[in-house]
């Protein structure tokens, strides 16, 4: 029984290592996201099967009072189910949002990327704003709009930079004379990079108008990530400005 349990957990570990290795490859640009995405059709079901196999191994090891192997089997079980859950949840969420990847608070005159342009060379999604997405954005995210902070521009500008850094972004450029800030956001698991640009304008020395744009480098749909990022950053700015 113990040998069978060991075989089960070792077999379960194979797809976990495959998925983990491919994830690392995507994060460090060793393989393209399209390569990983094309494999998820078979990899996710296999991960679910691996999770069940590791769970069976865990039970068998417990029956044999082999606590350390049982703990290892349980860890593999959690890894397999956790890895399968990510793509499943993303697919489910993708069905609730429009397939767009460029979100801006100003759809008439969206902030433009400048310093980030060299970083986007070769990206699947071009840096220019795609106006064919405007209608879908306005319908799906009517709450995404310009932010007005009732504090002078000179006070708000550093608060915005701080809010971006607190959100885990890397500042690429900050030009207070132009009122432009550009940054890169990197997702935690696959390391996908989305680019962000903010435009700040003073209003009569008593308020500051902030527009923000967030765009994915790859993927037809951002699964709502860019809109969520704008709302989150604006929330941070408002909190720090009070």
Image: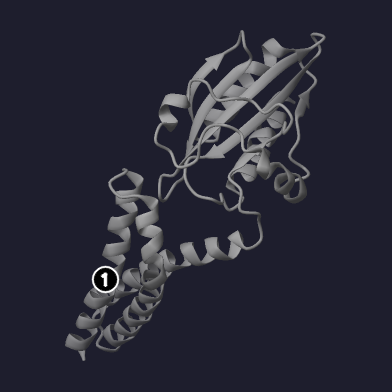
Task: Tell me residue 24's x, y (percent).
Answer: 31, 51
Task: Tell me residue 220's x, y (percent).
Answer: 53, 50
Display colour scheme: one colour
Position of the C terminus by quadrant = top right
Q: Residue at x 41, y 70 (%)?
A: 41
Q: Residue at x 32, y 70 (%)?
A: 76
Task: Tell me residue 26's x, y (percent).
Answer: 34, 49
Left or right side of 228 for 84: left
Position of the N terminus by quadrant = bottom left
Q: Tell me: residue 223, above or below residue 131.
A: below
Number of numbered tags placed on the structure image:
1
Badge 1, how many Cα within 10 Å: few under 14, some, many 20+? many
* Residue behind mark 1: 13
Q: Residue at x 62, y 11 (%)?
A: 178
Task: Tell me residue 59's x, y (percent).
Answer: 33, 85
Q: Secondary structure at mark 1?
A: helix
Q: Tell me: residue 22, above or below residue 103.
A: below
- State which quadrant residue 104 falls in: top right
User: Quick one: which residue is furthest to the bottom in this view?
Assistant: 1
Q: Residue at x 27, y 63 (%)?
A: 17
């Amino acid at each position: 029984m113990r040998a069978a349990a060991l075989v089960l957990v070792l077999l379960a570990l194979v797809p976990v290592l495959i998925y983990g290795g491919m994830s690392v490859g995507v994060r460090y640009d060793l393989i393209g996201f399209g390569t990983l995405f094309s494999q998820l059709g078979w990899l996710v079901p296999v991960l679910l099967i691996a999770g069940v196999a590791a769970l069976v191994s865990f039970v068998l090891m417990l029956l044999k009072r082999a606590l350390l192997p049982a703990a290892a089997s349980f860890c593999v079980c959690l890894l397999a189910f956790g890895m399968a859950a990510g793509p499943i949840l993303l697919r489910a969420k993708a069905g609730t949002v429009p397939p767009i990847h460029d979100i801006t608070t100003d759809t008439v005159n969206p902030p433009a990327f400048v310093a980030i342009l060299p970083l986007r060379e070769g990206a699947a999604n071009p840096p220019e704003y795609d106006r064919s997405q405007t209608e879908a954005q306005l319908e799906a995210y009517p709450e995404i709009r310009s932010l007005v902070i009732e504090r002078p521009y000179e006070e708000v500008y550093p608060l915005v930079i701080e809010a971006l850094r607190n959100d885990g972004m890397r500042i690429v450029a900050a030009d207070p004379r132009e009122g432009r800030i550009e940054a890169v956001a990197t997702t935690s698991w696959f390391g996908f990079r989305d680019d962000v640009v903010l435009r700040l304008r003073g209003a009569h020395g008593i308020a500051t108008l902030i527009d923000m744009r967030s765009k994915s480098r790859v993927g037809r749909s951002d699964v709502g990530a860019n809109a969520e990022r704008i709302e989150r950053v604006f929330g941070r700015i408002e909190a720090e400005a009070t």
